[in-house]
Image (spheres, grey):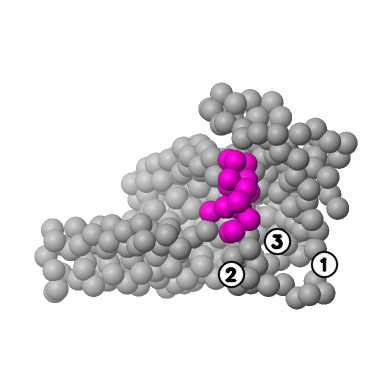
Amino acid sequence: FWIGAALGALGAVVVLDPRLFAPDIGWRLAFLIGGALAVIVVFLRRFLPESPRWLMTHGRPEEAERVTADIEARISPPADSPRRAVQLHLSRMHKLALASVAEVLLRRYPKRVVLGLTLMATQAFCYNAIFFTYALILTRFYGVAPARIGWFVLPFALGNFLGPLLLGRLFDTIGRKPMIAGTYSISGILVIVAGFLFRAGVLDATTQTAVWTVIFFFASAGASAAYLTVGESFPLEMRALSIALFYAFGTAIGGIAGPALFGALIATGARSEILWGYLIGGSLMLSAAIVELMLGIPAEGRSLEEIALPLSHRPSPFRDLDGRAAPDIS
C-alpha cells in the first residue's frame, strides 16, 4: 500500500506540475496512474498459490497437498528446525452464509469482535483523518503549492512502509499483545504531542512531515497487526471474510468520521480547533492499546487451528485458546 502511495506521490509531482500539464488534465492523469497500477493485480493473482487450508476445507485435499509440496520444495526449513504438526479431523465443507458468520462472530467470539473492531476503527480514524487531510494542512497553514504536495507525502509513505518491515518480526518474538499495545500507545502519545506542537506554531512543513513520518512508523506496524489479528482470530474457513467485514465496519466507524471531523476543524482555520482532532485521534489509539492488553490473544508461535477451532472440525478432547474443543496437536 505505502509503496503505491510513494509511487503515487512521485507521479503527482509530475502530472500536477502546471508547467507540464494543464490543471484539468493533470488530476485526471493522477487518477489514471492508480487505475493502471491496479490492473497489475489481474496478472499477479495468477502466481499466488491458493491457501492449502482453504482448499482442504472446500473438499480439495489433493490440490492442497500439491500447493504445500510446491512451497516446501521452494522454501525448505533447516533439517534440525522444530516442527509442530496439527492433526485435523474434518467432517465436511462448512458452507458460509451471513447468518452463520454472524452467529460465529457474535455468539462464539464476542470479545474478539470487540478487539478487532476497536483496533480497526481506531487506526482507520487516525490514519484517514490525518493522511486524507494532510494536503489541506500543507496548503492552508504552511503555504505549500498543490503541485509540491507529493514531495511531502513521499517520506510519510516511506515511514509507513519501514515500520512494519523493521518491527514486524517483533510481533512474533516479543508477542502480539505487548507489541500491538506498545505501537498503538506510542502512536497515540506522539499524535497528542504533535497536536500541541501544531497549535503552538513551532513546526513548518518539513518538520511537520518529519513528525508524521516518525509517528506512522509505529502506527503502521500496529495497524498491520490489526489486520493480522482479525485474520487469525476466527475459524480458518472465514479468515478472508473476517478481514473484509472488519475492514468495512472499522472504516465505516472510524474512517468516515475521521476525515469528516478534521475537514470541519480545518475549515475553521483555527489551530486550536484542529488540536481537538489530534487529541481525539491520539486518545482513541491509547484506548485501543488498553483494549488490546485486556482482550488481546497470545497468538504468536501458534497454528491457526490452536487459535480458533475450524468450523468443519469434528469434536475432540483438546481445547483451543478460548477453551473450545480443538484439534489434536502432536
Could you tell me which quadrant the N terminus lies in? bottom left
Q: Is the residue marked by circle 1 packed among few (<14), some (14-19), or many (20+) residues within 10 Å?
A: few
Q: Which residue is mark 1?
A: 82
Amino acid carrying label 1: it is Pro
In magenta, the rendered stretch is 50-67
Mark 3 secondary-structure assignment: helix
Dot 2 or dot 1, earlier in sequence: 1
> Which residue is at the far right?
317
Going by the image, does 320 lie left or right of 104? right
Magenta span: helix, strand or loop, mainly? helix
Mark 1 secondary-structure assignment: loop
The residue at 43%/68% (across/down) is: 3
Is 187 or 24 nearer to us in this picture?
Answer: 24
Mark 2 secondary-structure assignment: helix
Q: Is the residue marked by circle 3 packed among few (<14), some (14-19), or many (20+) residues within 10 Å?
A: some
Q: Which residue is mark 2?
A: 165
The residue at 27%/61% (across/down) is: 36
Amino acid carrying label 3: it is Phe
Q: Spatial distance from mark 3 to mark 2, Cα to Cα?
A: 11 Å
- The image shows residue 2, relative to residue 116, as above or below, that is below
The residue at 51%/47% (across/down) is: 124
Q: Based on the displayed image, in which of its 4 quarters is residue 205 positioned? A: bottom left
Q: Is residue 315 magenta?
A: no
Q: Spatial distance from mark 1 to mark 3, Cα to Cα?
A: 20 Å
Q: Are marks 3 and 2 in contact (CB under 8 Å)?
A: no
Is 210 or 114 nearer to us in this picture?
Answer: 114
- The image shows residue 76, relative to residue 244, as above or below, that is below
Q: Which residue is mark 3?
A: 171
Q: Is residue 52 magenta?
A: yes
Q: Position of residue 312 (x, y in %)?
A: 68, 35
